[in-house]
Image: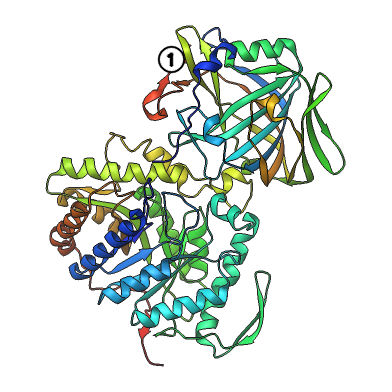
Amino acid sequence: MKFGIFYELSVPRPWDGEAERSVYMNALEQVRLADELGFDQVWCVEHHFLEEYSHSSAPELFLTACAMQTKRIRVGHGIVVCVPQFNHPVRIAERAAVLDILSGGRLEMGTGRSATWTELGGFQADPDDTKKTWDEIVRCLPKMWTQERFSHRGEAFSMPSRAILPKPYQKPHPPMWVAVTSPGTELDAADRGLGSLGLTFGGVAEQEKKITEYRRRIKQCDPVGAFVNEQVNTVNFLYCHEDGEIGANTGRRLAGTFNYMASQLLAAREAYPTRSYPSQGLLPQLRQESASPADGGKVPDGLCIGDPERIIGVVKNWESAGVDRINFLLNAAETVPQQQVLDSLRLFASEVMPRFDRATPPASVATAAAGGN
Amino acid sequence: MPYSGTLDVAPLLADAPRMDGFDTEAWEIAGVEILQVTFEIDDTQMLSLLPKALHPTIPQIVIFTVARYPEGPVGAFTLAQVRLGCRAAALPRGFLLRAYCDSPAARDALARQWGFDCAAGDVRLQRYHDRISGSVTADGRDLLRVSLIDPEPISGGDIQYVANMHLAVAPGDERGVLVQVDPEYRFQRAERGRPEVAAFDRAAWNAAGVDPVWPIVASYTVCDTGFPRIRYVLDPDKPAIVGTRKLDVGG
């Protein structure tokens, strides 16, 4: 089991001159501490226009700062929106390669397609096309990274032969993932030999079924990259405190605030009826799980909030379900004071992490090597 | 926290629909045709049109709906609505600015039983070769003309309608109440196309400042639906999370 941290970089109003900088600086301090404590990865999303919920429109810059301030922690660029109106595929490949070089081969590459009309409409992207463009781009990225020159004639984009530079530091290329929110995307991940970057919170039993199918299906995959990345990564909230009640209450506040902000966004499917988005992603689940920031209900079984013993039990359940990695959302709209976030990380690292085998890689993972050809 | 509406509802209560109470009987109606046209709007006026209980969607949207009910307890009628996309706490809703209906009996029932702010108008839903259009005229004026252009079939499972919120007055709620009307839909047919707004008399819809600037989509469905028993009402002046009241809908 590997542990990571996960950033949306949410910024509560009022947006005075220091609000966004404060959120970014707090996050960097958390990343430095996580690196010292032995967390394995830090992920940062790409979102646009998602006021308060996520002010993370240039994650490659944030992750570069993370990489330059840390020694070991891997940097998860994810997910990068593989929709040409958001990002030209060449720019995706180039930025990722630079991040991999600057981090010394610590890049994990997440791919996806956005799930909100707020973003798709803002870029005038057609929701019907995003699955197609993701599929096209995700098959091109490894070629851009590994071929001396690359040319392409497709629907999402076309280009004559060019050398796309620089090349990633990891050879043949960084591990690739796809965000899994819509039902069936775990199968898309498996068919292409990609890691499953689950972005749903809670619900161990439901996830276990998906993971089982992912593991079964990836055995017959036709990988888009140079190797198969059979791994299951999931997202969770983390608030760890010696006093279980304080931990649960603070964690519920964190989860409730995150869910409340997420629910204000206009899901692609809510605005635009399309087969391309068979569900609203994680929004309905979030609405169900937490009606408000002040929701005082019981702690959902799958959430890593409470005292260390409770969290150990939850992580063991996820491990039993087949999850290889858990990434934790540490804060939302700065609802948890920075010192408490840092204390929670320290307590988790001292009391929970040692209870798990974090050295043995998943049996079927073929990892990329850093440097050299 | 997200923005909330700033609408002071007190001055509106004198003209708000007066309900008989919340213990309404459900209407179930088969073969209802619904045209819905959605646009993003210029957001400068948005907050002043929403009660304090509601958050605007991000981005802010206006939803035009024209629906033909071929039967029902008061006979056939056609109903047009203009709603603003919003959230009651975390839940998707559409706040009704105004409705028009061509049947006096339906207008009366919709106002008294579900709190529809419903005026008299000639409401039409018409299908052409290349479009489906909805229109409202009253006193010789075009109040609304919206269309779905170039319809293409889609699955009814891809359609998601949001529940209504109506500002009304009811016995025991003389200071105003938001009534949630959340029908269920069983789709028989669904189509989708480009949206068009050819006429929109904002003043006639209590929609001053609502400027439909960016088209999203138009849809047309045939479905079994109706008007359900009322399950929730909200205090318009309090955040929905603390101002929501669940009604006893048993029996």
> Which residue is situated farthest in the right direction here?
B129
Q: Could you tell me which secondary element the residue under label 1 belongs to? A: loop
**Towards the viewer: B226 or B170:** B170
Color encoding of the figure: rainbow
* Total marks placed: 1
Q: Which residue is mark 1?
A: B248
Q: Quadrant of residue A170?
A: bottom left
Q: Return the x and y of residue A350 as percentages of the image width and height.
A: 13, 61
Q: For this view, does A143 lie left or right of residue A296?
A: right
Q: Return the x and y of residue A2 as percentages of the image width and height.
A: 27, 66
Crowd around label 1: few <14 · some 14–19 · many ≥20 (10 Å)? few
- The answer to whether residue A79 is above or below residue B105 is below
* Three-letter code, disc 1: Asp
Q: Return the x and y of residue A22 as percentages of the image width and height.
A: 30, 57
Q: Quadrant of residue A285?
A: top left
Which residue is at 38% across, 54% downward?
A: A208
Which residue is at 57% across, 88% downward?
A: A163
- The answer to whether residue A339 is above or below residue B49 is below
**Towards the viewer: B199 or A59:** B199
> Which residue is situated farthest in the front direction here?
A17
- The answer to whether residue A334 is above or below residue A160 is above
| Subunit bearing disc 1 | B
Q: For this view, does A341 lie left or right of residue B121?
A: left
Residue B88: in sight, yes or no?
yes
**Towards the viewer: B168 or A222:** B168
Q: Return the x and y of residue B14 as percentages of the image width and height.
A: 56, 11
Which residue is at 60% across, 40% downward?
A: B61
Residue A1: in sight, yes or no?
no
The quadrant of the picture occupied by the N terminus of chain B is top left
Which residue is at 40% across, 25% downward?
A: B238
